[in-house]
Each structure stands twice: as structure tokens, then as C-alpha cells.
Image (cartoon, rainbow, N blue to C red):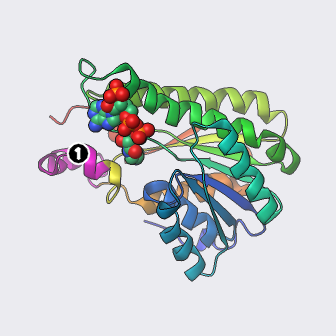
Amino acid sequence: MANKVFRENILQGKVAFVTGGGTGITGGVARALSKAGAKVAITSRKTENLEPMKKTIEDGGGECFAVASDVRDYEAVESAIAATIDHFGKIDIVVNGAAGNFLCKASELSANGFGTVVDIDTKGTFNVCRASYEELKKNGGQIINISATLHYLATPMQIHVSAAKAGVDAITRNLAVEWGRKGIRVNGIAPGPIEDTEGMKRLLPPQLKEALTRKIPLQRFGLIEDIENSAVFLASDGASYINGVTLVVDGGHWLTGTGLG
Ligand code: COA
């Protein structure tokens, strides 16, 4: 389980910019980066979704800057990044966690529904990477893109997210090659089923939880802390030769397929 020792102060002196950093998995990542010593800027569409996490981080002795922005809006992203640099002086680590999701059959999904998720997940990830490029280049910084395993096989009712996350993985690999040469590492994390997240609450009917657990080789759902540990590791110098990888953190789940039987 979680090894808290390795992450103490491991990111001292670093500044992280985390999209979707107010809640859920990426909220946990923001909190963990702070516990590991980084100053953290969090952004999402609504300020009210950021305030509780800002307070949690500050109550834990960390520094947090909350700035509202919609990752679909390039100019808004540029201003959030500029405001973070004004506030903390720099950015070393970018985490792209902002995401949209809902269950919908492909035959019932509207073009706008498909496009909305691709806009948030894929275009949003590109926007944030692109807008932070010059700053990351200056600092030998790095990017962590939160992905998924849905698209490794095929996941019913998730065509929009599967397509969007496949795009995110392509961004991770392309930027790792193009920007690795500029001293920027670009990696991803693909969480499997994670306990106590908005995604699981809304996407997994409670009666299916037991069947899903049986399918996971490690026989349990992941914890937000499992993703936090992976993010802290990837962000640390311990991962200094890791570039272009999407780390699957799913207890081996996707290897057993997407059905529940
Ligand atoms: N089923 C089918 N279509 C849906 C839908 C659902 N549950 N939710 C949204 N859509 C469609 C809408 O109908 C609309 O398409 P239309 O114009 O053809 O009708 C399109 O998606 C955009 O919806 P809208 O509500 O205007 O978009 P939004 O930008 O306000 O937010 C989401 C859309 C998907 C991001 C919204 O569900 C959301 O905010 N979710 C919370 C974030 C989240 O899911 N995080 C978990 C990550 S695992």
C-alpha cells in the first residue's frame, strides 16, 4: 500500500499547475504534490469547486493558488498560466486532469456530446501543454496527462471518452518526442477503477461493483492515493529517464477485458 516516506519533500521548490485540481483523482494529485513539497496552482471551470481543496492544502501547511479557467478556452488557459507564474514565479510541473464523462450509447450520443468530451479531454490537454511550453522549457519541466484504459480494448457507452483519451495518449507520446529534446518530460497515468470518485459513482451502477472487483487481478478497487503515489513518482527526479510512458494504475484490470463476466 501507500509508502508515505518516499514522497516527503521530494518536490520541494517545485511549482505545479493542475487542471481539474479541485476534486476527485486530480484533486488528490494536487494535494499529494503539495504534501511532497510543491507549491500548487489548481484550476477548473468553477471557483467554488476549487475553494475546498485550496483550504485542505493550506490547512495541511501547503501553498495553493486557485484560478478558474475552462481548458477548452485557449486564452483562458494562457491567463491562468500567466496568473500562476505571477503568483509563484514559475511552473515546473503541469498535470492535465480536467475531464468530462457520462455514459451514453454511441447510437444515442449527439455530435455535440462527443465533441464536448473530446474538447475538454483532448483539446484541453493540448491547450494546457501548448500554453505552458515556454515556461516548462525554461525550467526543464514536465507534464503528466491523466488518461484511462477504456480505449485499450473497447468500452460500451464510452465511445466519446475512449476516443478522447486515445487522443490524450497520442499527445503524450508526440510531445515526449518533440519536447523531450527541449528538456521536458511528458508522461501519463491511466487509472483503472478508483474508489470514491465522482466518475465511479456516476459511471458504475452499485450492483456491478462486486462483479467488477472480482475481475480485477488485485481483487480491489484502486484508491485515489494509488494515483497520487504514481503522480509524485513521475514528477520526481526518481523518474528522470521516464518519458513518453502512460503508467497504467489499475491492479491489472484492463488485461482481463472490459466485460464483467
Ligand atoms: N448523456 C448524453 N449526452 C450528454 C450527457 C449525458 N449524460 N451530458 C451531456 N451530454 C451532451 C449534451 O446533451 C450536449 O449535447 P447536445 O447539445 O447535442 O444536446 C453536449 O453533451 C454538451 O453538454 P453540456 O451540458 O452543454 O456541456 P458542458 O460543457 O456543460 O459539460 C460535461 C458537459 C460532459 C463535462 C458534464 O457532464 C460535466 O460537467 N461533467 C462533470 C465532469 C466530469 O464528468 N468529471 C468526471 C471525469 S471521469
Residue 214 in the image: above or below residue 31:
above
Q: Position of residue 142 (x, y in %)?
A: 72, 46
Q: Position of residue 39 (x, y in %)?
A: 70, 67
Rendered-image quadrant of the C terminus: top left
Q: Position of residue 140 (x, y in %)?
A: 83, 48
Under circle 1, the secondary element is loop
Q: Which residue is mark 1?
A: 204
Q: Is residue 170 magenta?
A: no
Q: Quadrant of residue 169?
A: top right
The region drawn magenta spans 200-220
Please indicate, yes or no, whether residue 132 appears anywhere in the rendered image: yes
Rendered-image quadrant of the N terminus: bottom left
**Is the CB of the residue bearing disc 1 within 8 angstroms of ligand 1?**
no
Residue under the image location 34 percent in, 48 percent down: 199
Q: Quadrant of residue 258?
A: top left
Residue 186 in the image: above or below residue 257:
below
Quadrant for ligand 1 reads top left
Q: Is residue 234 left or right of residue 206?
A: right
Q: Quadrant of residue 231?
A: bottom right
Q: Nearer the viewer, residue 190 or 129?
A: 129
Q: Is residue 203 left or right of residue 194?
A: left
Please indicate, yes or no, whether residue 242 appears anywhere in the rendered image: no
| Residue type of the residue flagged with mark 1 | Leu
Residue under the image location 74 percent in, 58 percent down: 84
Q: Position of residue 51 (x, y in %)?
A: 52, 68
As drawn, the residue found furthest toward the right would be 138
Residue under the image location 21 percent in, 45 percent down: 212
Q: Nearer the viewer, residue 67 or 14?
A: 67
| 10 Å crowding of disc 1: few (<14), some (14-19), many (20+) | few
Residue 56 in the image: above or below residue 226:
below
Q: Is residue 229 left or right of residue 212?
A: right
